[in-house]
Image (spheres, helix red, strand yellow):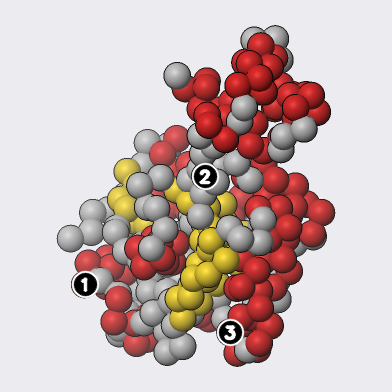
């Protein structure tokens, strides 16, 4: 049962309409208005489930201006449901400003559980799921993209990205260049749809797989990359470890690893990961 004066965050299917929950249908039927990322896209969903609640456009271009008007409506007693084109709102979709403004105004925000492409992909990837980091969409230009990836190169957690048809090959090429072509990864494409594909291999092999089949370059992508492997103490000789330990006492880890690499001739990334493990002890 929907209560007046509340904001509901309502997930919608990422592809298969059978994933729409009964509770989501109930809420969308009972609220006073639906704030939808694309009203034309949502209209098909609402029509399919016989939902006649009026919808208004709420997207990245108008959310800052519209969020306060919606909060005012809620404070006056209206109930509002927030939906995105697919999946859970706010996950690489608009909605952050509305939820924040609602909470600051003392409005109760009610989240409904539901579909999320990143969690769906992670559950079937076979990569470590106990610790992961979601990075959303990478920058469009290669230089900025590589800079972001470099900052993640030594992260031991599973890395999760969204990517588009137009940039999937370029992004994989940059990942291979920054992370190394042998780093394991998984491509999850068109999840819950007719041509759903979940394929894992090394980054270099995944590049070749996409290049060999243009059909696999179409659709919406989740890319999951295995986290960096921690360097064991034995992988670095005792002298290099001693140098790194001394430098870490005087310098930030990144600088200490870079200087220790110059002194020892070892790889900076290996020394950086070793420094992380030493800092935790």
For the residue pair 275 and 41, the one nearer the viewer reads as 275
Find the distance from the CA under tag 1 to the CA under tag 2. Answer: 42 Å
* Dot 3 alpha-carbon crowd within 10 angstroms: few under 14, some 14 to 19, many 20 or more: some
**Residue 83 visible in image:** no
Find the distance from the CA under tag 1 to the CA under tag 3. Answer: 33 Å
Name the mark on residue 229: 2
253 relative position to 220: left or right: right
Rendering coords of residue 120 (x, y %) = 38, 66
Q: Quadrant of residue 112?
A: bottom left
For the residue pair 156 and 192, the one nearer the viewer reads as 156
Q: Are marks 1 and 3 in contact (CB under 8 Å)?
A: no
Of callouts 1 and 3, the N-terminal one: 1
Q: Are marks 1 and 2 in contact (CB under 8 Å)?
A: no
Which residue lies most toward the left here?
1
Check disc 3 and report the residue beneath it: 216
Rendering coords of residue 214 (x, y %) = 65, 89
Residue 154 higher or lower than 126, as above or below? above
Q: Secondary structure at mark 1?
A: helix
1 vs 3, front mark: 3
Name the mark on residue 22: 1
Find the distance from the CA under tag 2 to the CA under tag 3. Answer: 29 Å
Q: Quadrant of residue 106?
A: top left
For the residue pair 23 and 77, the one nearer the viewer reads as 23
101 relative position to 259: left or right: left
């Amino acid at each position: 049962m929907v209560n007046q004066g509340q904001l509901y965050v309502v997930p919608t299917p990422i592809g298969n309409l059978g994933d729409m929950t009964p509770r989501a249908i109930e809420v969308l039927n009972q609220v006073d208005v639906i704030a939808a990322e694309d009203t034309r896209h949502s209209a098909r969903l609402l029509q399919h489930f016989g939902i006649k609640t009026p919808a208004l456009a709420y997207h990245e271009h108008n959310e800052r201006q519209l969020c306060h008007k919606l909060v005012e409506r809620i404070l006056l007693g209206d109930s509002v449901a927030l939906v995105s084109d697919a999946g859970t709102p706010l996950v690489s979709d608009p909605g952050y400003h509305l939820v924040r403004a609602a909470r600051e105004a003392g409005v109760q925000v009610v989240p409904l559980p539901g579909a999320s492409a990143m969690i769906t992909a992670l559950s079937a990837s076979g990569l470590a799921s106990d610790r992961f980091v979601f990075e959303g969409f990478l920058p469009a230009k290669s230089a900025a993209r590589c800079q972001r990836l470099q900052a993640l190169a030594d992260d031991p957690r599973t890395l999760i990205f969204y990517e588009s048809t137009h940039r999937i090959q370029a992004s994989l090429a940059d990942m291979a260049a920054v992370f190394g072509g042998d780093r394991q990864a998984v491509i999850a494409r068109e999840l819950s749809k007719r041509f759903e594909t979940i394929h894992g291999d090394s980054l270099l092999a995944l590049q070749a797989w996409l290049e060999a089949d243009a059909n696999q370059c179409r659709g919406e992508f989740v890319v999951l990359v295995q986290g960096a492997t921690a360097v064991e103490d034995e992988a670095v000789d005792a002298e290099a470890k001693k140098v790194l330990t001394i430098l870490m006492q005087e310098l930030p880890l990144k600088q200490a690893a870079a200087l220790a690499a110059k002194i020892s001739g070892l790889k900076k990334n290996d020394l950086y990961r070793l420094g992380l493990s030493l800092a935790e002890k």
